[in-house]
Image (cartoon, helix red, strand yellow):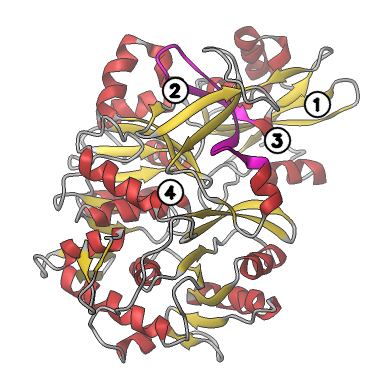
Amino acid sequence: MIINAQGTSEPRTYVDHILEHWHKDEDAEALVQGTHRLTRGEARRQLFRLGHALRRQGLAPGDGVGLFLANRVDSVLVQLAVHLIGCRVVFLPPEPGPGELAALVEQSRARVVVTDPLFAQRAADAAGRSVHAPVLLGLGPCEPGCADLLALADECPEERPDGVPAPAADEAVTVLYTGGTLGRPKLAAHSHRLYDTLVELVEDDPDESRSGFFPAMVPGADRVLAATLLTHGSGHLTSIQALVTGSVLVVLPEFEAGAALEVLREERITATMFVPPMLYALLDHPDCVPGALPELRRIVVGGAATSPSRLRQTVEVFGPVLSQGYGQSEALGITGFGAEDLATEAARRPELWRSCGRAIADVDIEIRAEDSTAALPAGQVGEVCVRGETVMLGYYEDAERTAAALHEGWLRTGDMGYLDAEGYLYLVDRAKDIIVTGSTSDNVYSRVLEDFLLTLPGVRNAAALGVPDENYGEAVQIFLATAEGVDVDPETVGAAVTAELGDLYTPRRTVLLDRLPTTKVGKVDKKALRAAWTSGATSATR
């Protein structure tokens, strides 16, 4: 509990846990982005100033604040400031087009939108389309009509804003974009329970046995790199976990393998998280050799399916530092596989390299058939269903989609997988990515195919899609990013697939590329590949 200005007690939030650290050892480093370095004392005072500056825009507890931000130290502080004054964080990621972004701002009921100068024009367009007419603020100087929030904060007090009520149990405090259809975005809304659970996991489980999704950290001793976007679940959780443990948070503005290696080395990073394409790019960099990062003791990989061969390569290069995590915007933390467990258990059972671990603390998992509430037995493939404190309240302002996704506290994730007898979860595909083909309309699981393709010489990354086929409904098409100077023969690849996985998985066509397109968060962009195939842009192989 904390005592407010009126002398009454209030529950502690995760921001209070961060401030407990920032009130101690004020000259210790807290936030880093290149030459922009803030001590704990400086970070705390700037946080309070930003809170007051936001309040002066007429914001009241419960109001929504859209954050259209790049990876910057100031972005971290603005997000904390929104929660500090009891408002709702609405993350506005960079990938939606103009119409979708405008719909996101409108549906989220954001009263204020804070934009990075890089995105100012797009933010102004989205705000201008909203009937709610949100106030537009820049995180620095922007175009006319967009006040500079940092300049406004410079004129504000350095004391903590008071009079903030504790959030209600069913109140949405954070909203994450998770796709949707044109003009109707899906916004996963989370309550303060998500943050309470995160704090409990990192405080109660320093050896990571219950919380392998989160890298175990030594309070006050770690230096954590936020490499994924702060406006996505992975970057948000990485930054919050670092701060609630009193660790130094280093923010990487943009991911490029060479630059990331340099920051990892020079900032003596001890823990970080990557999505698979980032990890693959790092492993393929010529400077990524054993011993290059002696301080690094934990890499979490998550956000998308990861190739077992690449996981083994990571351990060969960096040692037993690899943890796996599985979650999604609707459930920010489902399973985890701690580095120590992965190193010992996979040696006993090599198939565990394909697993994403077991349920984290206080999360239940069942595998269910379509339109069924009964759990399937171990080993049978079905939809992954979960319940627990990390599961969303629902889709914000969208009762219809919420009812379809949530039933009696259970979330239907849209991911297909199975549990083994020991409770390890194996994902085989997204439900929408399953390729249905063949004379009997059998399922081709793209994850299984992609994992195998990544074991072939010269293949750096792979994606499998189902494309329309007159005879079988869909045909398997694969896209391969190949290593420079290595000749990959499509016919040889096809023969290898057939020999290993059977005729059903044989690709009808193989496209060779220098690299696969990725989304802003770093995942392989299958929508872009599908669009390119439809338009004929991928008709030529490299």
Q: Nearer the viewer, residue 92 or 378?
A: 378
Of labels 2 and 1, the one closer to you = 2
Q: Amino acid at mark 2?
A: Ser
- Disc 1 target residue: 474
Residue 82: x %, y % from top left:
40, 71
Question: First in sequence: mark 2 or mark 4?
Answer: 4
Classify residue 367 as left or right of residue 20: right
| Residue plotted at (67% across, 9% down) | 502
- Disc 2 target residue: 355
Residue 62: x %, y % from top left:
48, 70
- Distance of label 3 from label 1 (alpha carbons): 21 Å
Classify residue 185 as left or right of residue 331: right
Examine the image and state in which quarter residue 447 appears: top right
- The overriding secondary structure of the stretch rendered in magenta is strand
Residue contact at pointers 3 and 1, CB within 8 angstroms: no
- Disc 4 target residue: 234
- Disc 3 target residue: 541
Q: Amino acid at mark 1?
A: Glu
Of labels 4 and 3, the one closer to you = 4
Residue contact at pointers 3 and 2, CB within 8 angstroms: no
- Report whether residue 59 is seen: yes
- Distance of label 4 from label 3 (alpha carbons): 34 Å
Question: First in sequence: mark 3 or mark 1?
Answer: 1
- Report whether residue 508 is seen: no
Q: Amino acid at mark 3?
A: Thr
Q: Amino acid at mark 4?
A: Ser
Q: Nearer the viewer, residue 408 or 443?
A: 408
The region drawn magenta spans: 404-430
Mark 3 lies on a secondary structure that is loop
- Distance of label 2 from label 1 (alpha carbons): 28 Å
Question: First in sequence: mark 3 or mark 2?
Answer: 2
